[in-house]
Image (spheres, rainbow, N blue to C red):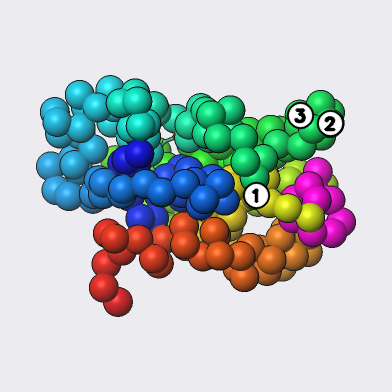
Amino acid sequence: MELYTYYRSTSSYRVRIALALKGLDFTAVPINLLVPKGGANRQPEYLAINPQGRVPTLRTDDGELLIQSPAIIEYLEERYPQAPLLSKDLATRAHERAVASIIGCDIHPLHNSSTQNLLKQWGHDEAQVLTWIGHWINQGLAAVEQLIGEKGYCFGDQPGIADTFLIPQLYAAERFKVSLDGYPRIRRVAELAAKHPAFIQAHPAHQPDTPAA
Ligand SMILES: N[C@@H](CCC(=O)N[C@@H](CS)C(=O)NCC(=O)O)C(=O)O
């Protein structure tokens, strides 16, 4: 498999975690979102692969091009059922997907690079953009804090889909200077993931396109 990825893209990071949790090998194809003139993601070669011009894209072993991290992760879950990312209990599965959706639908799109660029184009300065981002991250994480369990990962002793979304979101929270002080359950999950080999392998600090310090 090949994963079109950018080291600090949280959507790519989710898929990298899912691949690592399932023990699946892949080749990373870095797509630099920051290259001048719109970024490598906006070049015709990449638009032919992903018409939305975003990362991640997964090229499966069958040559299918899959886009959108939730769809990719659900594909991996169905195609490679080892180390399941969803619980057996149907209601718990819905809660796990709800946490993933809060992050993937209600937080991340509001601080994605294209959203930030538009806000800046409309005249908002860096401080205003950071306040905007902090507002949406805090609003979403406050709900996640209520929904996840009181011990272990988000929903039990093993990491699952909710964790694959939460940990990248916490990386973004740190990047945008959002404090996690008010979220003890979330901080507990973060501490567990920080010691888990799959989460370490998937971290933005350990990617082929991570800039040298
Ligand atoms: N909902 C999509 C979001 C993908 C997305 O927005 N990726 C960002 C990086 S995290 C991106 O490619 N941004 C570039 C752009 O918006 O032009 C997913 O989960 O895959």
**Circle nearer the N terminus (2, 3):** 2
**What residue appears at the point 75 percent right and 44 percent down from the top-left corner?**
143
**What residue appears at the point 71 percent right and 60 percent down from the top-left corner?**
189
Q: Which residue is mark 1?
A: 163
Measured along the vertical axis of the image, is residue 121 above or below residue 149? above
Q: Quadrant of ligand 1?
A: top left
**What residue appears at the point 58 percent right and 28 percent down from the top-left corner?**
78
| Ligand 1 is within 8 Å of the C-beta of the residue at disc 2 | no
Crowding at dot 3, Cα within 10 Å, few <14 / some 14-19 / many 20+, comes out as few
Quarter of the rendering occupied by the C terminus: bottom left
Residue type for callout 1: Asp
Q: x and y percent of residue 60 in the render?
A: 37, 31
* Image-quadrant location for residue 121: top left
Q: x and y percent of residue 171 in the render?
A: 52, 59
Residue type for callout 2: Asp
Contact between marks 1 and 2 (CB within 8 A): the answer is: no
* Image-quadrant location for residue 165: top right
Question: Which of 44/116 is in front?
Answer: 44
Measured along the vertical axis of the image, is residue 165 above or below residue 80? below
Task: Give the extent of the magenta segment.
Answer: 147-156
Q: x and y percent of residue 177 in the render?
A: 53, 64
Q: Which residue is mark 2?
A: 89
Q: Which residue is mark 3?
A: 94
